[in-house]
Image (cartoon, helix red, strand yellow):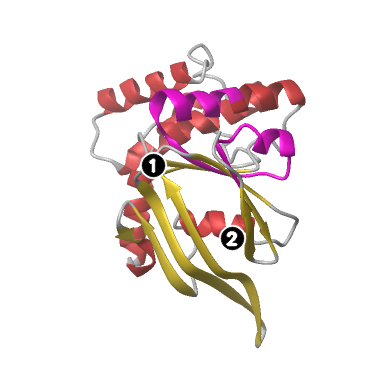
Amino acid sequence: MTEALISIHNLSKTYRRGNQPVPVLLGIDLQIAQGDYVSLMGPSGSGKSTLLNLIAGIDKPSGGTLLIGGVDIAALEEDELAAWRAGNVGFVFQFYNLMPVLDAFENVELPLLLTHLSKAERREHVEMALAMVGLPDRMDHRPNELSGGQQQRVAIARALVTDPTLIVADEPTGDLDRKSADDVLDLLDRLNRELGKTIVMVTHDPRCAARARTRIHLEKGVLLSRGAEH
């Protein structure tokens, strides 16, 4: 795990509130290796979710460089960026973001509808992803028929189904009870250790952060520390 997947140099992000600039990230320098499992921690307003959104290509930086797999994603046009996200990033959110009118199979299939896979190939990918998260018998259940932990596992299957290089997770256990949270963390750990997925996770929970290989702490837009890999 030596080659950098994510290379960040002097990264900054400033929003505007009316005519007033609001700096959120200030000169971030960071390298994240291929296959690492990183937790981003910090108090509310520290910039951790902003940094995650920049890494995921959801937002663009105000300055500095951000290379992922050698690609300068800040330089991509919107349609190029959307295609890059679809092929390279899997998203896991705190509140699952599942479509309530679709069953688990259909929710997981959604990212594949943007690909050139046939219907049979999509079915194979979806069934494999749901089996990987332990829900092969729940594929015809809608979100309201699933527990919170099961919904988050469906969301992880959706993130996995395109076989992305990078998984970004924003407070993935924030809406779960302790047992369900531990199950989700065990699953993320397996994806990292067995499949080599690079994971970048925002969390406020020290127990959750401790499961990552590398811990990064932000405060007021500045990178304060980086914990040793374990």
Q: Which residue is at the front of the view, 149 or 115?
A: 149
Q: Is residue 62 above or below residue 115?
A: below
Q: Is residue 150 visible?
A: no
Image quadrant containing the N terminus: top left
Check disc 2: other Cα within 10 Å, few if <14, some if 14-19, many if 20+.
many
| N-terminal label among 2 and 1 | 1
Q: Position of residue 157 (x, y in %)?
A: 47, 28
Residue 224 in view of the camera: yes
**SS of the residue under disc 1:** loop
Percent position (x, y) of residue 43? 75, 55
- Magenta residues? 186-215
Q: Which residue does the image show at 67% across and 44% down from the upper left?
A: 203
The residue that appears at 52% across and 15% down in the rendered structure is: 134
| Tags 2 and 1 touching, CB below 8 Å | no
Q: Residue at x 54, y 29 (%)?
A: 188
Seen from the viewer's position, the closer of residues 215 and 116 is 215
Residue drawn at x 53%, y 56% as measured from the top left:
53
Residue 173 vertical position relative to residue 105 in the rendered view, above or below: below
Q: Is the C terminus in the top left, top right, bottom left or bottom right quadrant? A: top right
Image location (x, y in percent) of residue 4: 37, 49
Residue 219 position, x and y percent, is 70, 61
In the rendered image, residue 204 lying in the magenta stretch gets the answer: yes
Query: Is residue 221 positioned above or below 19 on the image?
Result: above
Q: Nearer the viewer, mark 2 or mark 1?
A: 1
| Disc 2 to disc 1, C-alpha distance | 21 Å
Residue highlighted by disc 2: 50
Q: Which mark is drawn over residue 85?
A: none
| Total numbered labels placed on residues in the image | 2
Instruction: Identify residue for label 1.
Output: 34
